[in-house]
Amino acid sequence: MLNPQWLKSFSMLSETGSFTQAADRLGITQAAVSQHIRQLETQLGPLVLRNKRPLELTPSGKVLINYCDEIRQADKRLLLSLSESETTRGEISLISPGSIGLRLYPLLLSLQEQHSGLTIRHRFAPDSDVIDAVLHNQYELGFITQKPDDRRLVGEQFTREPLELVLPAGLKAECWEDLEALGFIDHPDGQAMATRLLSRNFPGNAGVRNLPQRGFSNQIGLILEPVARGLGFTVLPRFAREAWPNQAAIAVADCKIAVTDTLWLIHRAEWPLSTRSEEAVNYLRRHFE
């Protein structure tokens, strides 16, 4: 590993172009700066052209100054990550299922617009991946659709989200035959969601697996595209439906028996949330209320 003091002298020399000025800025002797540069050149080869005024970096010197810049940036990120008092600077990392994520991410971007020092890192993932990522400290915050049962996690009820039967605009689903005529637009959780909602509202039906399948998409933002085009119906959580940009092209069926999921906010139990993440959670709660 290269000596940090040598690198500091080299960075200042590159900035000032003069051994004398670099020594003055650093509060050390010119001989000390020269010795630091010689130590680096012993390991890395020639770094500066001393016969130039101001001094000029060699190709190796330019590579090294880029390395010094990377170290400075890494130091800044480290200080931000460890600063508990910073509420408007640093990273907010969050992982969630697709539907709630479609609602959360735009809100977090609005928060970032208010505080440009924040960085938002968000990933869409199923419950099992959310839990694993939070447990392995890859993300500080997570949202899941079932109460966590791992003692290493703190789980707090965050909000509730109903499942919705979504049809093409102008159509109704008054009986099972209406759904058969339309056909089902499936997605990775489609069969399970549709079974939970439709079995309660259309008792005695033949089952979702027996419906004609008119399409499939694993992209949460595209599942309603075939529905909007009149090609079939689907069952989605409300936040995913609300994120669809063309609400006039779809309709939500009036289901007499609601099926609603509780969404849980999770984080590691062994240490508290960072101050900025606590502030972000409070901000999100206000919008969901």
Image (cartoon, helix red, strand yellow):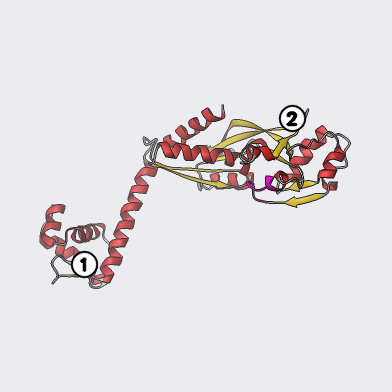
- Residue 223 is one of the magenta-drawn residues: yes
Q: Is residue 284 visible?
A: yes
Q: Is residue 181 left or right of residue 286?
A: right
Q: Nearer the viewer, residue 173 or 141?
A: 173
Q: Position of residue 193 (x, y in %)?
A: 74, 40
How far is mark 1 from mark 2, CA to CA? Answer: 73 Å
Does residue 101 sit above or below 46 in this rendering? above
Give the class, few, some or many, for how many residues have Cα within 10 Å of label 1's Cα (few <14, many ≥20). some
Q: Specify the quadrant that holds the N terminus.
A: bottom left
Q: Nearer the viewer, residue 173 or 205?
A: 173
Q: Position of residue 30 (x, y in %)?
A: 11, 60
Q: Specify the quadrant that holds the C terminus.
A: top right
Task: Say which quarter of the image contains residue 146.
Answer: top right
Q: Position of residue 222 (x, y in %)?
A: 65, 48
Magenta segment, which residues? Answer: 218-225
- Residue 55 is one of the magenta-drawn residues: no
Task: Say which quarter of the image contains residue 13.
Answer: bottom left
The residue labelled by disc 2 is 258
Residue sitting at x 45%, y 32%: 279
The residue labelled by disc 1 is 39
First-in-chain label (1 vs 2):
1
Q: Which mark is residue 190?
A: none
Does residue 288 sit above or below 191 in this rendering? above
Check disc 2 and report its element: helix, strand or loop.
loop
Residue sitting at x 44%, y 39%: 112
